[in-house]
């Protein structure tokens, strides 16, 4: 099949907008407890893609698209996931100067979903961190901000973000309170021109009147209180009590399949995944909170690639396109050297943060650039030993796993979806999204526009 440049450009734009990576919805193992299975089944319509395309290319295709009218939110008591974290998680780290309160969480949740806090009133935190897509974005490899401005990295998942010691793919921030300002100000995210601009905008929106003062003992919106409110909400998004947790920590032998148990043994043995994705005696964060060079960043930076790229033209329909043709209709891709951009230390080239594996089945595509679309592709990448380079992590080596063994490790990772995902997503659906009113500070409401 041949395509004109115009057609190729259309296809690539479509891929960017609608994505090549599908989400893998986990279901409880058939041997899980009846109570948990019922709870998960009842909430399943609340998460995952609304337009389910899986099997679309089959002549026997039957739509499984979700009824959006049924995706009605239900506000939850989010504080329970801080005071009593789900099985498998340790105590939630909470700064002494920013205790989590109901008022702060409610305010932070409102800020997180408010589109008016972007430069043109169209973009909120939740547009990159989509609740029903694992609080990331399953449909695009790298994030897209206001007016379609592209970023170079995948939107990171924010479940269990309270436990992170380093934040962003390159680890450039250390607290959630500080982290929130980067997306507010980045030109290819929410694109606000300054901190003061955001603060003044919040002060001018009538809906926020008194909310900061109530949450912060009389203090109004400031750089500090905005960060404290948003981080309070994010610290409640703790998800565990997965089938793995009920088997491993809860000693419920029938919570997972035999394949999952084999995958667990491989995870901690031959596959050496636990070298970075840590499991402790009484909890598991599945991250070492460190940065590593796996070779994937090197691969992209050096332009080492195959001759063709597989592009999805429609659900289930693919074509292998010559990279030179794709390049002719694409803008040059920005180089990404990872941690080096922060430290300027040559030894930090292509280092990226170890992500948690909790809820990983919900958060495709994978890696810092979203270049791997399935967990099986991730396993194949590590099985080959990453990509050799002069600063490759010594932990990355060829594994020699068989196809069956890779499938077993994938099955194990699929067992890490928390039982409270539906509750957190339903709560997110109940949050206001910041619809613009005539009372909001928007240029369109100026009376003397000429």
Image (cartoon, rainbow, N blue to C red):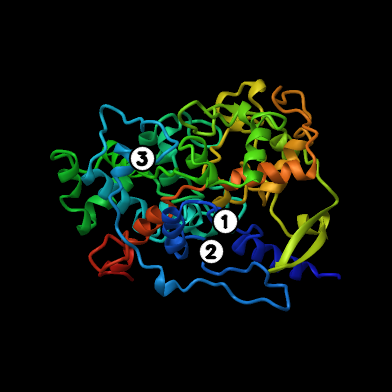
Which is more toward the observer, 414 or 70? 414
Give the residue at x 26% y 49%: 107
Give the residue at x 72% y 30%: 270
Q: Are marks 1 and 2 in contact (CB under 8 Å)?
A: yes
Residue 393, numbered label: none
Q: Quadrant of residue 8?
A: bottom right
Under circle 1, the secondary element is loop
Kindly report the distance in space between the C-alpha atoms of the residues bearing marks 3 and 1. Answer: 22 Å
Q: Which residue is labeled 3 in the image?
A: 235
Report if residue 295 is visible in the image. Answer: yes
**Lower sequence index among marks 3 and 1:** 1
**Lower sequence index among marks 1 and 2:** 2
- Quadrant in the picture for the N terminus: bottom right
- Residue 401 in the image: above or below residue 320: above
Point out residue 339 in the picture as x, y percentages from the top left corner: 59, 29
- Residue 214 in the image: above or below residue 248: below
Under circle 3, the secondary element is loop
Q: Which residue is labeled 1 in the image?
A: 138
- Residue 114 in the image: above or below residue 384: below
Count of numbered circles in the view: 3
Mark 1 or 2, closer to the camera: 2
Under circle 2, the secondary element is loop
Give the residue at x 45% y 36%: 88
Q: Are marks 3 and 2 in contact (CB under 8 Å)?
A: no
Q: Is residue 222 left or right of residue 13?
A: left
**Lower sequence index among marks 3 and 2:** 2
Kindly report the distance in space between the C-alpha atoms of the residues bearing marks 1 and 2. Answer: 8 Å
- Residue 349 in the image: above or below residue 153: above
Q: Which residue is labeled 2 in the image?
A: 49
């Amino acid at each position: 099949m041949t395509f004109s440049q115009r057609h190729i450009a259309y296809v690539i734009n479509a891929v960017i907008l609608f994505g090549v990576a599908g989400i893998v919805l986990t279901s409880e193992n058939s041997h899980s407890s009846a109570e948990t299975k019922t709870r998960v089944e009842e909430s399943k319509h609340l998460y995952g893609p609304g337009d389910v395309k899986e099997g679309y290319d089959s002549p026997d295709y039957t739509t499984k698209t979700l009824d959006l009218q049924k995706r009605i939110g239900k506000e939850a008591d989010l504080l329970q996931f801080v005071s009593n974290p789900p099985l498998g998680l340790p105590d939630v780290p909470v700064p002494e100067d920013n205790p989590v309160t109901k008022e702060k969480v409610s305010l932070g949740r409102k800020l997180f979903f408010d589109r008016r806090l972007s430069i043109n009133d169209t973009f909120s935190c939740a547009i990159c961190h989509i609740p029903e897509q694992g609080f990331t974005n399953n449909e695009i490899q790298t994030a897209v901000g206001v007016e379609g401005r592209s970023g170079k990295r995948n939107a990171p998942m924010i479940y269990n973000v309270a436990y992170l010691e380093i934040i962003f793919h390159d680890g450039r921030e250390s607290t959630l309170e500080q982290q929130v300002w980067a997306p507010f100000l980045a030109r290819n995210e929410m694109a606000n021109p300054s901190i003061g601009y955001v603060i003044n905008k919040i002060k001018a929106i009538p809906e926020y009147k008194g909310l900061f003062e109530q949450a912060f003992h009389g203090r109004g919106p400031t750089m500090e209180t905005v960060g404290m409110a948003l981080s309070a909400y994010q610290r409640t998004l703790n998800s565990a009590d997965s089938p793995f947790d009920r088997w491993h920590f809860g000693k419920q032998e029938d919570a997972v399949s035999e394949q999952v148990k084999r995958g667990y043994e491989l995870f901690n043995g031959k596959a050496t995944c636990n070298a970075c994705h840590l499991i402790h005696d009484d909890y598991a964060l599945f991250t070492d909170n460190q940065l590593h060079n796996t070779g994937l960043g090197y691969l992209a930076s050096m332009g080492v690639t195959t001759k063709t790229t597989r592009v999805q033209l429609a659900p289930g329909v693919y074509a292998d396109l010559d990279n030179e043709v794709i390049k002719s209709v694409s803008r040059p891709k920005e180089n990404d050297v990872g941690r080096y951009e922060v430290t300027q230390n040559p030894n930090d080239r292509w280092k990226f943060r170890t992500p948690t594996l909790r809820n990983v089945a919900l958060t495709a595509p994978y890696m810092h650039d979203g270049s791997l679309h399935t967990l099986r592709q991730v396993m194949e990448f590590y099985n080959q030993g990453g990509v050799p380079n002069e600063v490759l992590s010594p932990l990355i080596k060829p594994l020699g796993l068989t196809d069956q063994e890779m499938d077993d490790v994938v099955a194990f990772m699929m067992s890490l979806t928390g039982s409270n995902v539906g509750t957190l997503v339903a709560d997110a659906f109940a949050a206001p999204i910041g619809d613009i009113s005539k009372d909001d500070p928007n240029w369109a409401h100026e009376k003397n526009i000429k």
